[in-house]
Image (cartoon, coloured by chain):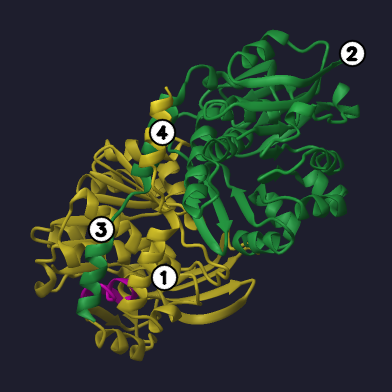
Chain colours: A green, B yellow
Amino acid sequence: MSLLVVGSVALDSVQTPFGSYEDAIGGSALFFSYAARLLHPVQLVAVVGDDYPFDALARLAKQDVDISGIERQPGESFRWKGEYSYDLQHRETLETRLGVFADFEPKIPEAFRDARYVFLGNINPELQLSVLDQIHQPNLVACDTMNYWIHGTRDVLLEVMRRTDVLMVNDAEARELSGDWNVYRAARWIVEHGPSMVVIKQGVYGAVLLENGRIFYVPAFPLDDVFDPTGAGDAFAGGFMGHLARTDDLSAENLRRAMVYGAAMGSFAVERFSVERFDEIGPAEVTARVREFAELVRFEIEAEAEAVRSEE
Amino acid sequence: MSLLVVGSVALDSVQTPFGSYEDAIGGSALFFSYAARLLHPVQLVAVVGDDYPFDALARLAKQDVDISGIERQPGESFRWKGEYSYDLQHRETLETRLGVFADFEPKIPEAFRDARYVFLGNINPELQLSVLDQIHQPNLVACDTMNYWIHGTRDVLLEVMRRTDVLMVNDAEARELSGDWNVYRAARWIVEHGPSMVVIKQGVYGAVLLENGRIFYVPAFPLDDVFDPTGAGDAFAGGFMGHLARTDDLSAENLRRAMVYGAAMGSFAVERFSVERFDEIGPAEVTARVREFAELVRFEIEAEAEAVRSEE
């Protein structure tokens, strides 16, 4: 089932305690695509400047990513510069240069308009609405956002939410959006405002899915070395949506699996700088990691639970 | 199998955003006992002043807790006063009055010296050593500690660790003890210094078990309302050790189950002030919550993993 992502394709400059890099390929739609393509072909819509390293995009095009929806505009690509704290738990944006992204008006190619699975990366909610207006009949729409839009364009964001099936946000965004500190109450507030499902990403502490009143929890993968959290949330979204598009199954059981594929992709993203790790792995590594997740949380209670009951 | 706890029995005064209380019963050994007794009888060794509400202890004595190891000394009981931040994630100690606890020298009653499962609550490591000297042949010793001892009496603590099977600490303590920010590397540092197992408690984010090179992760139970985190870590220890003493089974499978019983008890602890929740529940509620944990993390990957493999 066709999978479409609309978002940023950017150049990132990042400082971490373990090293730094400049003008590496990044952006929400790029991280999403690098992860999702390991599970399912991707249609990518974005804008880049004429300074963008086209070989990187050409490489993606050979790897199940349809880049015909990427516009090249005269001018500078979107650039983001950030610095992480010593423990990688906090980051500060040092500079944002929108470049050609400032005037981005997503035009969905005719061939993409039948997309069944759609991910709206973190862009202006006005643009997210315009994307939805161009799509014929999606089976599932997932959407990311950020505090900037929650503050600045709340009404438009609420309109996007009414047309979204899965809102994917981090815990701070969920709290800010709902005005409730408790993430589970925040998640319920969100499903009362449109989306039938919410994914709350909690970084090194994993992610929570609320669907149909039920909560599913997937931990973050235990890693001895984390180099660069940039793009982890978008890689998570890529794993989640890639799995759903591949299986075309929205059962509760399969949504749980999608969460685990998301967590697996998020864990790969942070193991190297930029998208480097995704150039090293294939489907076999993804499968192996998903199996490790199963082992990480596996326990059996039946026998014990019976024993307790019989003592009562 | 006999289960012994040595630690503090105190009077807590606590301020939270949701209410406050004064001189409620508390302390590491008390929270441990309230939780563990739901799974297995407990032998409790501690000291209290002559101001301690003896009816609370008498009630425990009727509920599978042997309180014959509690000394009553003339003077004031140990008192702790603390205040939690608006999100309950941070707490400040406002006052600590050691009272009779200052001269506590644990004397293990003859009848308790054959204890097979021993929990050393967070007390001076010198006292923890003295307890171990009095125990004949424990099957498993678990130990808690805190930053104060990690700084102040590190060498003695390292000696305790050499005689401990399971170190149970929170993530900040694990980091401080090991000097390593990454909790998984910190856990491995700990097992290189004595304990064969480490439990790292992460509060609202769950807990990690490292045993035999394997990591098991149990989330915190999703609660809409958390009132008072006081004692949650000791209740976790009570669930963990209560389950092990009850089953007398140190297999990897059963240690995982013990983690879930620990997480269940931790979740009960925070649902009311002080130990109030434990007066409301019995084994049936514990069993029900353990089953909910199983549902919280349950997913099946087999079919999917095969599908990915066949595509390769």
Q: Identify the amino acid type marked 2.
A: Pro
Proximity of marks 3 and 4: CB atoms separated by less than 8 Å? no
> Callout 2: residue from which chain?
A
Reply above or below: A31 against B25. above
Kindly report which numbered mark, 3 or 2, lies closer to the viewer in this rendering: 2
Where is residue A137? Give x, y as percent.
Answer: 73, 44
The residue that mark 1 highlights is: B98
Q: Secondary structure at mark 1?
A: loop
Q: Quote the CA–CA distance across marks 2 and 4.
A: 43 Å
Look at the image and give the residue range highlighted in magenta: B34-47
The residue nearer to you, when weighing A266 against B102, is: A266
The numbered disc on residue A209 is none
The residue that mark 3 highlights is: B128
Proximity of marks 3 and 1: CB atoms separated by less than 8 Å? no
Q: Are marks 1 and 2 on the same chain?
A: no
Q: Quote the CA–CA distance across marks 3 and 1.
A: 17 Å
The numbered disc on residue A74 is 2
Kindly report which numbered mark, 1 or 4, lies closer to the viewer in this rendering: 4
Q: Quadrant of residue B176?
A: top left
Q: Quote the CA–CA distance across marks 3 and 4.
A: 54 Å
